[in-house]
Image (tube, rainbow, N blue to C red):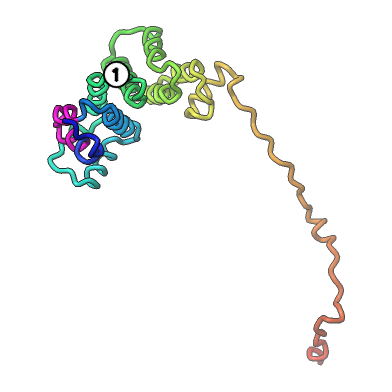
């Protein structure tokens, strides 16, 4: 359309997407790499929030957007939307770190569901190999996996996962810490030494000299109390 330089993505591009009018929005910015990048970066940033749906609800209220498709605000459809946009505009998916992370988190949860809810027949070795392949070098994903394993009572598995991915000892639950210490005592941090404190005895308190009455002290009215 050639008008994209006159508007920002918040003027109507994001509202169009929230109204499930994706084709109109993408057609409008077909020739603008700047607008495409800005739109995808905004959506990826929303996915990086702890609650993307809550963030978008606030956005909708602030911008007074009507006829919103609220199901589009959930993590899964939002992740798919960003994936489609990056493919359409031939953008590098590495420019959308939160999309990749949400996909890995979904894969991790799917593995946990298969193992502990569906009770699928898979060996522990195969299960943990798949878990490790999802986590790779992502510390937050490792901590997420440990959280799930602990909740399922897999304390030993959680501890081994923490050790494999070098999760800090203090970042895991107490029972996982205990198991980590059993497997590898060297991971336990040395206790901080408490500062030395001088304790004053009662005798020292009583040895403090009582100051004599100075010449400026008020005289004791002894005479008033004599009979």
Q: Give whichever of 214, 200 is nearer the camera.
A: 214
Name the residue located 40 percent from the left edge and 10 percent from the top edge: 129
x, y percentage for residue 72? 19, 32
Quarter of the view holding residue 78: top left
Name the residue located 22 percent from the left edge and 36 percent from the top edge: 14
Check if residue 15 falls in the magenta segment: yes
User: Which region is colored magenta?
Assistant: 14-28
x, y percentage for residue 118? 26, 16
Q: Where 50 sits versus 218, above or below? A: above
Q: Where 187 sits versus 214, above or below? A: above
Q: Where 189 sits versus 207, above or below? A: above
Q: Secondary structure at mark 1?
A: helix
x, y percentage for residue 124? 39, 9
Quarter of the view holding residue 151: top left
Residue position marked by numbered label 1 in the rendering? 110
Q: Give whichever of 102, 7 is nearer the camera.
A: 7
x, y percentage for residue 94? 36, 20
Check if residue 5 falls in the magenta segment: no
């Amino acid at each position: 359309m050639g008008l994209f330089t006159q508007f920002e993505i918040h003027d109507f591009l994001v509202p169009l997407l929230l109204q499930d009018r994706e084709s109109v929005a993408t057609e409008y910015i077909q020739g603008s790499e700047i607008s495409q990048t800005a739109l995808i970066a905004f959506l990826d940033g929303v996915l990086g929030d702890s609650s993307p749906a809550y963030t978008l609800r606030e956005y909708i209220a602030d911008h007074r957007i009507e006829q919103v498709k609220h199901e589009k605000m959930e993590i899964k459809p939002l992740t798919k939307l960003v994936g489609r946009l990056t493919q359409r505009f031939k953008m590098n998916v590495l420019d959308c770190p939160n999309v990749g992370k949400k996909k890995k988190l979904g894969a991790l949860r799917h593995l946990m569901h298969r193992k502990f809810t569906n009770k699928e027949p898979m060996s522990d070795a195969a299960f943990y190999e798949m878990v490790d392949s999802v986590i790779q070098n992502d510390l937050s994903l490792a901590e997420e996996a440990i959280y799930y394993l602990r909740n399922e009572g897999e304390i030993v598995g959680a501890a081994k996962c923490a050790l494999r991915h070098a999760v800090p000892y203090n970042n895991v639950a107490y029972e996982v810490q205990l198991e980590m210490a059993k497997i590898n005592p060297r991971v336990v941090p040395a206790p901080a030494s408490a500062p030395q404190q001088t304790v004053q005895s009662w005798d020292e308190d009583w040895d403090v000299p009582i100051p004599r009455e100075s010449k400026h002290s008020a005289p004791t009215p002894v005479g008033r109390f004599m009979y």
